[in-house]
Structure formats: structure tokens, C-alpha cells
Image (cartoon, rainbow, N blue to C red):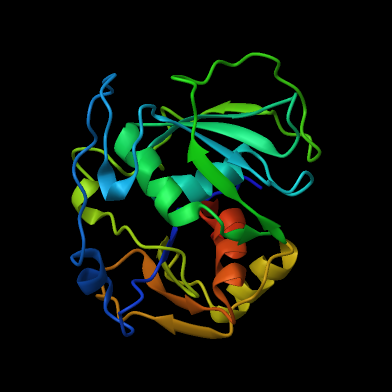
Amino acid sequence: CVSAGPHCPLLPLPANSRYRRNEEVQDMISYPLLLPKTPSSSSFLGHTASSSVAMVSGLHPARMNCSYIFNLFCLYGNVEKVKFMKSVPGTALVEMGDEYAVDRAVTHLNSIKVFDKKLNVCVSKQQAVIPSQVFELTDGSSSYQDFSLTRNNRFSSTQSSRNIIQPPAAVLHFYNAPPTLSQQQLHKLCIEHNVPAFTKFKVFDAKPSSKTLSGLLEFDSKTEAVETLTVLNHHQIRIPS
């Protein structure tokens, strides 16, 4: 649903972290700036990639769409385009900003479970995602979406130092939420979108002048956290007038 209010991003919390202040979490890890696409190979984290396109299979046929794939993959690099393959149900191609982003996505997202389906993420032989054979997904959305201009892509020269690259975890870090957001409102949001609800909720102390809220959400399992992140990452929260 599109409504007035800021986007509320979600991020996995570092596995070796205790509950921290927002500023401390953001300063822990930074990644290289977005690199230009080249035909050369990369070997980041032990993977050999020759493409900036990832292929993901094992997607839930009724519950996954282009936006949800973006919500997952954007944690590991800029997402340019997403296309579901009509000839191979439950499979999509994800064009990312560079080969390093594909490497990170393969490293952290391969074999995770989302909606009771185990994802298989690998480097695609395709060099680009072409919007051909566009069709309607089960939820009524398009099988192809271009995300190249969205502000929710965070791996740019001005924002890259704020990125935290972490594997999926049972604790999520949320930020840019309305300052009036309550635990009850977040619980209701989870129920409305049919995703697991968190079991623990913590808000970071904010400056009196702060216009946004940040904090932590802990779930019973990594899988539950991933499913909630998949659906609610970048969700726009309505601010009462």
C-alpha cells in the first residue's frame, strides 16, 4: 500500500553485536563503492563471477514478486532490474550494479528459506536482464520491474559508507520510521501483511530534534526475520495527520 510517510528500511543486525545505538551499528562495516560494469571476472569472497546478473530459483509462486526480491537483494548491492522467467516457474533474474554485488548476494542468500521454499542463488550466464515476455504474477503485479532509478538503492558514492553487509539474522535493525511509531503498530503491520511478528522490540534513544525513529526487532528464528524483511523492507508507514 502506498501512503504518506517515510520508507522504513530493515537490515540484519551483525551476528556478533549486542543491542547498539544506531550510530555504532552503521560505523561497523563499509563496502567498496559501486564499480563500473566490466567484462572481466571477479573473485570476491571465493566466488568466480563473470556477470552482474544473478539467477534465483525456488521462489514461492504465489508470495514472491519483483519488489520482494528487490527488498532482499538490495542489502548486498544496487538492484537494477528484476524479471521472472515465464518458461521456468519460480525463477527470476536479478541484474545488479556490478559483479561484486552478485557475489555478495550468492554468498548470503543462497540456500536461505523464504515462505517455506529454499532459494538457490547463482551467477547467471546472462549479461543483462531484457524485459521480454512480461506477464502478470499471481498477486497481479508485473513479472518485470526496473529499479535503476529508485532511491532505495543504497550502494552509491554518497551512501556506501553507511551500508552494513551481514548474513541473514534473527534480529533486524529498522530506521527512518516515524517518531510516533509504536510496538503495537508494528505488530499490527506484521499481521496485516501475513508475516511473522517479532518477539522483542527495542527503540534507540533519539535526539529531541530527531524526525525519525530507529531500533531493533528480534524474531524467533532467522527464517522468520527474513520473511518479514522480504515483505516490509521499505514499506511506507502512514503518519496520522
Q: Picture coordinates of residue 122 (x, y %)?
A: 50, 40
Residue under the image location 44 percent in, 47 percent down: 106
Taking 103 as reference, is 116 above or below it?
A: below
Taking 143 as reference, is 103 above or below it?
A: below
* Location of residue 127 by image quarter: top left
Q: Picture coordinates of residue 35 (x, y %)?
A: 22, 31
Q: Picture coordinates of residue 95 (x, y %)?
A: 46, 29
Q: Specify whether 33 is left or right of 196.
A: left
Q: Specify whether 137 is left or right of 108.
A: right
Taking 42 as reference, is 22 above or below it?
A: below
Would residue 60 be seen by someone viewing this image from the given angle?
A: yes
Residue under the image location 39 percent in, 69 percent down: 213
Residue under the image location 66 percent in, 68 percent down: 190
Would residue 8 be seen by someone viewing this image from the given angle?
A: no
88 and 13: which is toward the camera: 88
Residue under the image location 78 percent in, 40 percent down: 139
Taking 51 as reference, is 229 above or below it?
A: below
* Location of residue 102 by image quarter: top left
86 and 196: which is toward the camera: 86
Q: Picture coordinates of residue 25 (x, y %)?
A: 26, 70
* Location of residue 131 by image quarter: top right
